[in-house]
Every structure is written in structure tokens, then in C-alpha cells.
Image: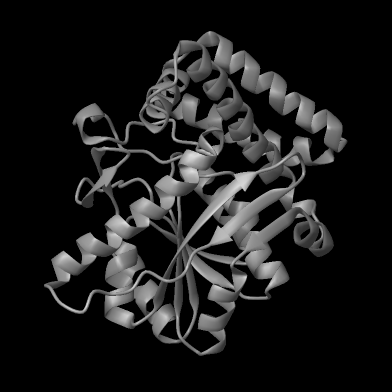
Amino acid sequence: MSRASDRVTDALYGLGWSTVKTLPEPVAAALGRTIADTVWKRRGPSVLRLESNLARVVPDAGPERLAALSKAGMRSYMRYWMESFRLPTWTDERVAADVRVEGDHHLKDVLESGRGAIVALPHLANWDLAGAWVTRTMGVPFTTVAERLKPESLFDRFVAYRESLGMEVLPHTGGSAFGTLARRLRAGGLVCLVADRDLSASGIEVDFFGSRARMPGGSALLAQQTGAALLPVNLWYEASPVMRARIHPPVEVPGTGTRAEKTSVMTQALADAFAGGIAEHPEDWHMLQRLWLEDLDPREPRRGNE
């Protein structure tokens, strides 16, 4: 049954990449909204979890507003997928026109100085499109890390897709990703990491919207070990086809403290930057899994969105 389910999952994603990108754009957008609304109406576990997460982000929201936010959130999530299925066909000019970035000088200044840069961002809007903007508009390749999905063929699809956008993709598991990322950064390269959800159960505890959550400390550790700049980034959608991005100033390495203490301070700074962007655009935060410590079930496997 597991193998059959894996084959079906892989086939569905393959169908998306092969078929959705051939549809006229208005048809693809309408299809995405229809799927999102259908899933939202069924009130399955992912929708209920999204609504529960949004209740922490917008604590004064009543049931009607939470329902509206979760519906908008599912539409935003399906917009991400429709765009991702079609992104390999977008021209460089299309990417440059549809992604509008504030604070890009923070990233450009670091890279022009020869210093490595770590871009850390939450699951907001379309992080793959943001990556395409970096590779196609800035002309800068970068390295990222992806969760090793099952079946393996599905993981291979995602790797091929992201490599087609100009990314070097390392598997999250296996133990060698951190060392490779450090080498890229010491050579003055760029690393981009989605960093608002820990998949290892050994992340750094942070205060996030008034409750404790755990986020990966790898970005802060890499900055300390390599001297690279750590730049938080937030994304959000405007009316289709525009996506906006804000690159924040670098998170500084504290001057005193142990490595663990510095990592904690820097990861909290990332969490604070992420919280600002999520609070402004909660409907674009695609967090359909448990995040806060008091919500976690130790028996639940930790899986990402990708």
C-alpha cells in the first residue's frame, strides 16, 4: 500500500509539472483557486492545523475571520503550487517584472565585498520564485537544502526542478550538508535556507508570537563559523502576478557569550524578523504543520512543505 501511495503521489506531481505549465495562465489560476476552495471546505487536518496556527498569529481574530484567513491561506498555498509548476517556463524578464524587492542592496553589498551570505526566510509566499529572482535577475547561483521526500523519485523531481532554476540542492539528511554549505560560504557564495520550522527535534527554542517554538539553528551556526552575513527575508503576495520581498539588514553575531548563547540570540532575531512579516501577511504563511512546542505530538513525523 505504501509503495502504491508513493507511486500515486509521484504521478500526481509529475502530472502537475507536465500539464499545468501548458494551461493558459487564467485557467491555471482558476484551477488553483478551485482546488484550494475544495480542500478548505472539507476541513481536513491540514486546514484545521493552518487555522490553529493562524489563531496564534492573529489572537484577536474570531471564528469568521479565522475561517476567512484559512481560506485565503489555502488559495495562497495553491498559488504557490500553480506558480511552481509553471515557473520553469517563465522568462527572465517575467521573473524580473513580477518579483519586486525592497532592501536588495543589503544582499548585493555583502556579495560584492566577497563575503558569503546566508538568506533565511520562512514559508511565506513562493520561496522558489524568490530563488529564481536571485539566479536570473542578480545572476548569482546559490546552494540550498531540501528535505528528502518519499518516494525517492519525488525528491529527484524537486531536485531537478530547483536545479533548473539555478540552485544547488543538498539533501537535508546524510550529515554532509552543513560542511558543504560552510565551504560555499567561505568561498564568498550564497546560501538560502527556509528556516522557520525545525525538522530535527534539536533546534533552538525561540519565543514566537508569545509562545515557545523550535527553529533550526544552522543559519546562525554557519554565520559564526564562516563569517558570512545572515540576512532575514520576508515574502508576500500582491495581486497576481506580483510577489514582494523585503531583505532585512544582517543579524549581527553577538560580541560575547558561548557559541550556544550566540546561536540562541541570533535565531531569536530571525524569529522576530519572520514574525513581523507573517503578522503583516498571515494568509501567505504556508504552515500546515504543528510548530509550537505545546502543539507537537512526539509521535508525529516531522515533514516539511516542500
Residue 301 x, y percent position in the rendering: 29, 34
Residue 152 x, y percent position in the rendering: 46, 45
Instruction: Name, please, the residue furthest toward the right.
Output: 24
| Residue closest to the eye, 154 or 211 | 211
Can residue 270 be seen by looking at this rendering? yes
Q: Quadrant of the N terminus?
A: top left
Which residue is located at x 58 percent, y 44 percent?
A: 125
Q: Look at the picture and state if 112 lies above or below 92.
A: below
Instruction: Name, please, the residue furthest toward the front.
Output: 60
Can residue 306 be seen by looking at this rendering? no
Residue 205 x, y percent position in the rendering: 20, 49
Asked if residue 77 lies left or right of residue 300, the reply is: right
Asked if residue 193 lies left or right of residue 244, the reply is: left
Which residue is located at x 42 percent, y 71 percent?
A: 250
Residue 148 x, y percent position in the rendering: 41, 49
Q: Look at the picture and state if 306 lies above or below 225.
A: above
Asked if residue 201 lies left or right of residue 61, the reply is: left
The colour scheme of the drawn protein is one colour
Which residue is located at x 50 percent, y 89 percent?
A: 114
| Residue closest to the eye, 272 or 302 | 272
Q: Look at the picture and state if 218 lies above or below 199.
A: below
Instruction: Name, please, the residue furthest toward the left.
Output: 258
Asked if residue 16 lies left or right of residue 194, the reply is: right
Quarter of image, res 100: bottom right
| Residue closest to the eye, 237 or 136 | 237
The count of marks equals 0
